[in-house]
Amino acid sequence: MMKTTRNPDRYFSADPATRNMARELYRNVAHLPIVSPHGHVDPRLFADPEASFGSPAELFIIPDHYVTRMLYSQGIPLEGLLKGDHRQIWKIFCENFHLFRGTPSGIWLMDELASVFGVDEKPQAANANRLYDALEEKLASPDYSPRRLFERFNIEVLCTTDAATDTLEHHQAIQQSGWTGCILPMFRPDAVVNLDTANWEGNIARLSEASGIDVVNYLSFIQALEKRRTDFKAMGATASDHAALTPFTTELTPGDADTIFQRALKGKADADDAARFTAHMLMEMARMSIEDGLVMQLHPGSLRNHNDVIFRKFGPDKGADIPLQTEYTRNLLPLLNKYGSNPRLTLILFTLDETTYARELAPLAGHYPALKLGPPWWFFDSINGMARYFDQIMETAGIYNTAGFNDDTRAFCSIPARHDLWRRAAANWLAGLVVRHIIGSDDADEMIAELAIGLAKQAYKL
Amino acid sequence: MMKTTRNPDRYFSADPATRNMARELYRNVAHLPIVSPHGHVDPRLFADPEASFGSPAELFIIPDHYVTRMLYSQGIPLEGLLKGDHRQIWKIFCENFHLFRGTPSGIWLMDELASVFGVDEKPQAANANRLYDALEEKLASPDYSPRRLFERFNIEVLCTTDAATDTLEHHQAIQQSGWTGCILPMFRPDAVVNLDTANWEGNIARLSEASGIDVVNYLSFIQALEKRRTDFKAMGATASDHAALTPFTTELTPGDADTIFQRALKGKADADDAARFTAHMLMEMARMSIEDGLVMQLHPGSLRNHNDVIFRKFGPDKGADIPLQTEYTRNLLPLLNKYGSNPRLTLILFTLDETTYARELAPLAGHYPALKLGPPWWFFDSINGMARYFDQIMETAGIYNTAGFNDDTRAFCSIPARHDLWRRAAANWLAGLVVRHIIGSDDADEMIAELAIGLAKQAYKL
Amino acid sequence: MMKTTRNPDRYFSADPATRNMARELYRNVAHLPIVSPHGHVDPRLFADPEASFGSPAELFIIPDHYVTRMLYSQGIPLEGLLKGDHRQIWKIFCENFHLFRGTPSGIWLMDELASVFGVDEKPQAANANRLYDALEEKLASPDYSPRRLFERFNIEVLCTTDAATDTLEHHQAIQQSGWTGCILPMFRPDAVVNLDTANWEGNIARLSEASGIDVVNYLSFIQALEKRRTDFKAMGATASDHAALTPFTTELTPGDADTIFQRALKGKADADDAARFTAHMLMEMARMSIEDGLVMQLHPGSLRNHNDVIFRKFGPDKGADIPLQTEYTRNLLPLLNKYGSNPRLTLILFTLDETTYARELAPLAGHYPALKLGPPWWFFDSINGMARYFDQIMETAGIYNTAGFNDDTRAFCSIPARHDLWRRAAANWLAGLVVRHIIGSDDADEMIAELAIGLAKQAYKL
């Protein structure tokens, strides 16, 4: 029987000296609680004490676009993966598990199966049914409810991502339930800020409703956003999050902003309007952050829904979001000149263009007090992605201008595996510095604790 | 005497655990036959059973722009390298062999000299004459004829690259000769598709002749190309190849395409016409591939003939083709939206811009069923180039969305060295995954066989 | 007490075989003299035999924008670092020395403290005062005068960087003093060539004065530059240096150049004028280099003074210069087509965009006889920066198309640490090639000597 390979030294360098040092550093932080300041877990899972993760297919495959896109890329129709019989979906996945060899999904899935569900076998055609039965049984038991796993995972705090129009009712339910798990909302206003969002007008209507402010022009739009930020803060939010095609920033006059906004209300805003309005709103969001203290995050550079056929058939988040070359030095100049030296601002930047690590992001973060760099994101949340991040950012920015780790995941059960991978990668990087006499082991002891949770807690004010 | 350094563990990691595992994996595939699905060897060499490689200068230096450009870069005039006395050319090469230290050319040349010609000395001024004599003698012997070496190299299949206007007479001669070596043509229509090709009108005339279709407009142009693809398929071709300055794709109406084509026939097409026509023809080529089953390859991003003086004096392919920044995400959107999910299409992408590996190519190939990624190309067909390829592509795309190895060479005698280097680099990469417990050794055993020849045979339908 | 970690094997690979070989190669060159062909040390330090480096804050912190920008990035006001009490500045630095963990500044500072000043403790709050006293005492002693340290550092030649309008009086004083240290000027005309320089008209007036040629139009401007190049050569200069926002080159007619120049004299040149004039002047500078033999250097790609508030308050060089994406293949085409094959030209290129290493710079340098690649620059003058440089450039360019090492520093006392780091990194890179049997150890012995000083001396004609 094929066993999964969860060696205690996994992911560390093959070099014995480095590995020994990495193991020691990792041991310092392996059992620290998990701080998850940015992710996409559905708060509903925790609002209802009886909630369950559903079938193995619902837990591991259907919602995980990392998994379905890889299967799709090899010619497996998406219909069968998203809408088929769950046991059959699981079988397809097991038959094709070799596709995930050497990928982060492969690592997370094997780790999750083993450490969360006690399944030590590699999925394959031969054991598909047996594994399905075993997982199904566990998922039906109260020990595998979201709340129980949250406790077992030792999560200190988990932040979700919530639309500016969200009622936050599930967060409210969690907080009023008496359950002690700390789950906080995060303010993500993209769907009202980016004018080219599908059904933007509908979102504006929902914003009016949620804020109690009738959004009829730019001024009331700003007021409504400020109101919702206050609501989010009241529910414990410490951060906002912003996606944009590019990190372009520019400041419009209120009059110009209103002109664009009015065009958008009439359904007449064009692509240039949308780009300029987003660019302006990023500056507004920085201003609001300075006023209300919410940490601001910016995630640019993904061309969403590249495959139009898939988008029309199955909607967004189906693994067809493709990164773009991204430019930060000039694009962020207006925002950073106005707010980058303000001690009240924390702006955490992410990228899908690793060429910007050493060239733009580290020099910017190594200068501007307001800037911190988020962890390697999405495709780069991986062993090699982390190694490149450490190698290309830290020499110029130092670790103290970074924001620790985010798991950024919808897949709740993969959270321990993802944080564990980061802690191992960080320990391995630091071990390499120690054995090459670049830092002392006393330095490394402090740095591993910062990288594991300290920097994240500080950057996100948690 | 300076010996060349052909250690049996060459190119493997210095780390003993990784090296041992790499050696074991390599051993599995070292003696597999060579599958060479893309290259530039002249079929004439095999059409005539008496053909020879000529002098050592003709074999190793004159046609190899990797070699001549390096000598030229150090101030050695190209005249003396391309048109001089052959023994003198060889002498210059030997005197300057230190220039190739640490380069792939250095590796291939030393390996080729040793394993093909039994020459174990590093070329240098002192042994230049002696080596020339030894090589000249061997090259004159029947054991060193192209056909004998093809057999000795254990080549299962070798694909050449042939213009759309090629008569394929040498391929015909090979197939009719009774010799059993498998050499297949590949359809490369750049010289008629790219309107800015030197003497494009002449090429169109030759296309009319070769196809028997009088090419007078866009429609007859398409018919002639389809006819030639059929001819190529009849001779065993399984693939087409396309070079373009950028991977820009767009679909023109037949009317617009014809308007541009007519301008070109009158010698009045401009750079924009050429760019749009190529962009359109890439989509047409994908359509034809879906219809006739030829695998489509795209090699964009080289600015050819950068050094105008050299181009005017010595023609193309003299080592002055320089890569450009390349963008795939937006440029390929039209083609991939129309054809990228079609199960009948295989589109193999190459790049000279390694920044696109992790940012664009792996995410695209990890989504679209039609896409596969070609191996590291040209400047990146090297130890470090392969390491970066494995590290930056495989986590997101997985190996099964890649197309194995191409040697892409004109230098027939370097083929075994190049495939050997790839197999060693692949074994070394997999060994690193095994010793870090990222994959199991059972996984690695299957993966090395795929990387050595399996993926190439499948991707190219060989 | 925290000791700094100056292990004799520092910065070498953790792998024992590689480390042993690196140690051996390093030993060959550790004690070679220092050749520093490009830097920013103030010649005044050596003109006056009594000159001193001032206080510890003046030596280590105030002029070092690598250090002050890192402190500023963590919210420490620049006022207190540049204008405060020196002992207090030193204290802030010591309290925050952890910020430099794993950074090149951290490495240089610890090495400099230990090897130049005998201070083996890591700076921290607790020892700040004691270290200040110890350093202050040493800096006041004659043994720590610039001239004595120059001798102790075993510097064979040190090139400074001097404006085209510089009187070179300090260089004159050094040469007439009878002191034997070899300090040469370098011609840097940016402030008169780049029309958008602050106070450009004033600089032109100073150019008239320094050259004795009344600069009233483009022709007299060129004459004045040629005159100053002659003056610099007379003082021993072997090179010129040029900064530009991009490496764009283009040739204007003398008439067009004069039109722009006249607009500039009237204060009416715009950004496009400045860009085109610089592009043209780069070609002029290549022409002059061919005539007078000065080696030409080009340092493009830094967007200077990104933080406008800091620039207005504290001036340039405060750690707010941020790199930009840079394109060489097309931008240099006019210059390289005209002069790139001229055997009298040496053009040394630098970059802040590492993506150009393998994609553009190595292929260009591996073709054009005039081109050589400068060492990893600025943010990339670091352990990882050097490793990436070796890995991404050498396979295509070979070491003989590179120009060895520059320290490029204002911080005189860090020069030995910087050259030592380069020699260690080069030894380590070569060791990796030897133990993987890519080159022989005989090759490596020759290559390490070239990399340590041979290539720099040859490229800069020293």
Image: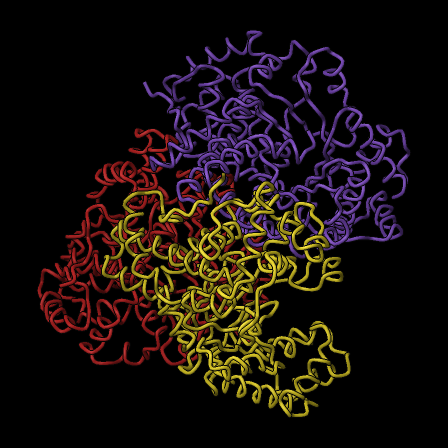
Chain colours: A yellow, B purple, C red
| Looking at the image, residue C92 lies above or below residue C387 | below
| Looking at the image, residue C92 lies above or below residue B400 | below
Q: Is residue C346 left or right of residue C64?
A: right
Residue B168 position, x and y percent, is 76, 23
Within the image, what quadrant is residue A33 found in?
A: bottom left
Q: Is residue C270 left or right of residue C454?
A: right
Residue C180 position, x and y percent, is 17, 51
Can you say which quadrant of the picture contains the C terminus of chain B?
A: top right
Identify the residue at horizontal 73%, vertical 20% (top origin): B171
Q: Is residue C285 left or right of residue B264?
A: left
User: Nearest the camera: C98 or B398?
Assistant: B398
Asked if residue B307 shows in the view, the reply is no
Residue C43 position, x and y percent, is 25, 62
User: Nearest the camera: C191 or B335?
Assistant: B335
Can you say which quadrant of the picture contains the N terminus of chain B?
A: top left
Residue A348 position, x and y percent, is 47, 71
| Looking at the image, residue B311 lies above or below residue B235 | below
| Looking at the image, residue A427 lies above or below residue A400 | above
Query: What is the tally of numbered marks visible in this picture?
Result: 0
Identify the residue at horizontal 77%, vertical 20% (top origin): B169
Within the image, what quadrant is residue C150 found in?
A: bottom left
Within the image, what quadrant is residue A364 found in?
A: bottom left
Asked if residue B177 shows in the view, the reply is yes
Q: Is residue B119 left or right of residue A97?
A: left
